[in-house]
Amino acid sequence: MKYLLDSDILIDNLRKKAKLDEKVVKSGCINIINLGELVYGAFKSKYPIKALELVENYIKDLGVEVISLEKEIIYVFGKIKADLEKEGFKLEDFDLLIASTAIVYKLTLVTRNVKHFKRIKGLKLYSSLEN
């Protein structure tokens, strides 16, 4: 089983609040949106240059693949967003793009926000962290 790490998991691990499960890291990846959220956080920090270096080293040390957005992901995103809106639900576009990546690549999304993502049909979720 391969995993897509959600930004909340990455941020907690980067801040040393939680340790990633070894099996998740060994077969894990992120997408470009996750990287963008980490970079955004770095630019918001008091010392952005240092924070950006930390983010770059963190991703390199994890050794995870970074998946780019592609047409199929965008089409899945559009369908999921429309379906959720018809049901009266809204999720942030970045979260929907992360979920769409997991669906297209047949990955299990590792997140603390299971409640947040469970409305998305066809999305496999995993929420285990080591403390």
Image (tube, helix red, strand yellow):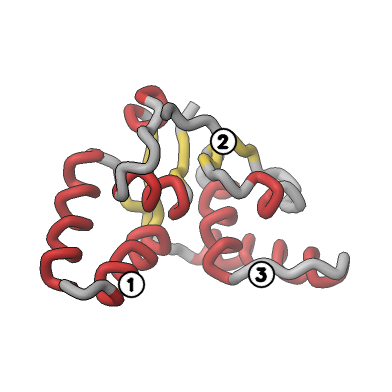
> Which amino acid lies under the numbered mark 3 shown in the image of this protein?
Gly
Q: Nearer the viewer, residue 125 or 55?
A: 55
Of labels 1 and 3, earlier in sequence is 1
Of labels 2 and 1, earlier in sequence is 1
User: Height in image: 45 above or below 15?
Assistant: below
Which residue occupies 24% across, 49% down? Answer: 59
The x, y position of residue 55, in whole percent, is: 22, 57
Q: Outermost residue toward the top?
A: 23
The x, y position of residue 18, in whole percent, is: 39, 38
Badge nearest the viewer, 1 or 3:
1
Which secondary structure lies at badge 3? Answer: helix
**Dot 1, how many residues are within 10 Å of its Cα: few (below 14), some (14-19), or many (20+)?**
few
Q: Which of 90 and 69 is in front in this view?
A: 90
- Asked if labels 3 and 1 touch by Cβ distance under 8 angstroms, the answer is no
The residue wearing badge 2 is: 127
Q: Label 2 vs label 3: CA separation? A: 25 Å
The residue wearing badge 1 is: 40
The x, y position of residue 42, in whole percent, is: 26, 68
Which secondary structure lies at badge 2? Answer: loop
Which secondary structure lies at badge 1? Answer: helix
Q: In which quarter of the image is residue 34?
A: bottom left
Which residue occupies 56% across, 62% down? Answer: 95
* Left or right for 25, reference 61: right
Which residue occupies 35% across, 32% down? Answer: 25
The residue wearing badge 3 is: 78
